[in-house]
Image (cartoon, grey):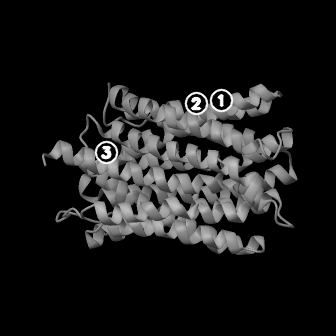
Amino acid sequence: MDKAKESRRVVRIFSWASFLNDMGSDMIFAIWPLFVTSFSGVSMEILGLIDGIGDAIVSVSQAVSGYVSDRLKKRKFFIWTGYLFSVLSRIGYAISTTWQWLIPFRIMDRSGKMRGSPRDAIIADVSTDENRGRNFGFLRMMDNLGAVFGIIFSILLIQYLGYKTVFMIATIPSIFAVLLIFFSIKERPLEKAKLFKGIRFSNLDKNFRLFLLLSTVFALGSFSYSFLLIYAKNFGFSVTFVPVLYLVFTVIASIFSIPFGKLVDKIGRKKVVGISFLAWALTCLSLIFIRSYFGLILIFILYGIYLSAKDVSQRTFVSELVPAEFRASGLGGFQMVVGLAALPSSFFAGLLWDRVGILTPLYVSLGLTIIAFLMLMFVNDTKKA
């Protein structure tokens, strides 16, 4: 099999595994904030804390798996094991009787993201400068397409089966994802793999350092999607309609993933990152000023555009700002630093929501987004139009 065909096969397998796992994940995520707040004693602060812990664990798990993956010269183990963690955590959610029980299972669930850095490193390795953005875009499209199916199943099932039965059903597609990776992906040799060991932050490429810093600043303001769903619920949308809004932004993210992937390859990585920042700023501004049901739906469309632009452009940009020989470590390290900012971000957003006012987190986020956007102007793109 020639290199181009092998590359397409690998990207397709990972994309279908992501489709399956995200189908199961978003059967849960579509109703997650409603599920968490159904437990007695749960405030927005607690929801923000649980979400923030989850986002921080995602980051640490990707950094650790990226480092260990490079050290052991193995990728596949972390990918199928990550999907297996998703299966086990959903069983845990289903048997939880208090919100405190959710925390260890949330940690396990988000630890499953250990698959991210090794998988993204493989995709970056089998891609070229001309199709890397498109390949990440296709992967992200399949992520979101699986999420669309998961949300639809969640909407159809939740009113008849309840949260916990839906969570048990959500384990099924992820089991198939485990099997697909385990039996269909062959381990690729990584004789030249290196580590961040012995490399100082000051010695890394200045563009990577600046991009890492500005992405962290932005992450401090980009709180969890759970806040948007609870905002919609408080605005007057029924509990049964809130998952439909989750479906709206997921469909939009799926539709725009490949176009943004192609745009990344065509006009450069930096410009699409800037588009994602702009889309988030417009989302926050719209939440501040729009007071209509139709307007709120448009806000979720904007949020979907933001997600697709950010995910595709960041992965592509970072995979090229770090040397190929320690790409998994680079991707994982970036996700760790940026993701750790998500813990205070979601927690303080919840704190400001409860203690100061519902709009305060939006103003804070806008300010941080403007700072990150100005910093982005000083980053040199690795691929320009």
Q: CA distance from mark 3 to mark 1?
A: 28 Å
Which residue type carries mark 2? Answer: Leu
Q: Is residue 274 left or right of residue 225?
A: left
Q: Are marks 3 and 2 in contact (CB under 8 Å)?
A: no
Sooner in the amino-acid sequence: mark 3 or mark 2: 2
Residue at image position (34%, 41%) is 135
| Mark 1 residue element | helix
Apparent side of residue 290 relative to residue 111 in the rendered image (left or right): right
- Mark 2 near mark 1, Cβ–Cβ under 8 Å? yes
**Residue corresponding to mark 3:** 320
Residue type for callout 1: Leu
Q: Which mark is residue 278?
A: 2
Tell me residue 319's x, y (percent). 34, 48
Query: Which residue is drawn at the image coordinates 83% and 42% (left, top)?
Result: 238
The spot of residue 106 in percent (x, y) is 62, 67
Q: Disc 3 residue type?
A: Glu
User: Is disc 3 placed on a helix, strand or loop?
Assistant: helix
Q: Is residue 169 visible?
A: yes
Horizontally, residue 292 falls left or right of residue 178, namely right
Q: Measure how far apart labels 2 and 1 are at the Cα level.
A: 6 Å
Distance, label 3 to label 2, CA atoms, is 23 Å
Q: Is residue 135 above or below residue 107?
A: above
Residue 282 is tagged as: 1
Residue closer to the observer: 206 or 13: 13
The residue at 86%/38% (across/down) is 236
- The residue lying at 78 percent from left, 47 percent from top is 230
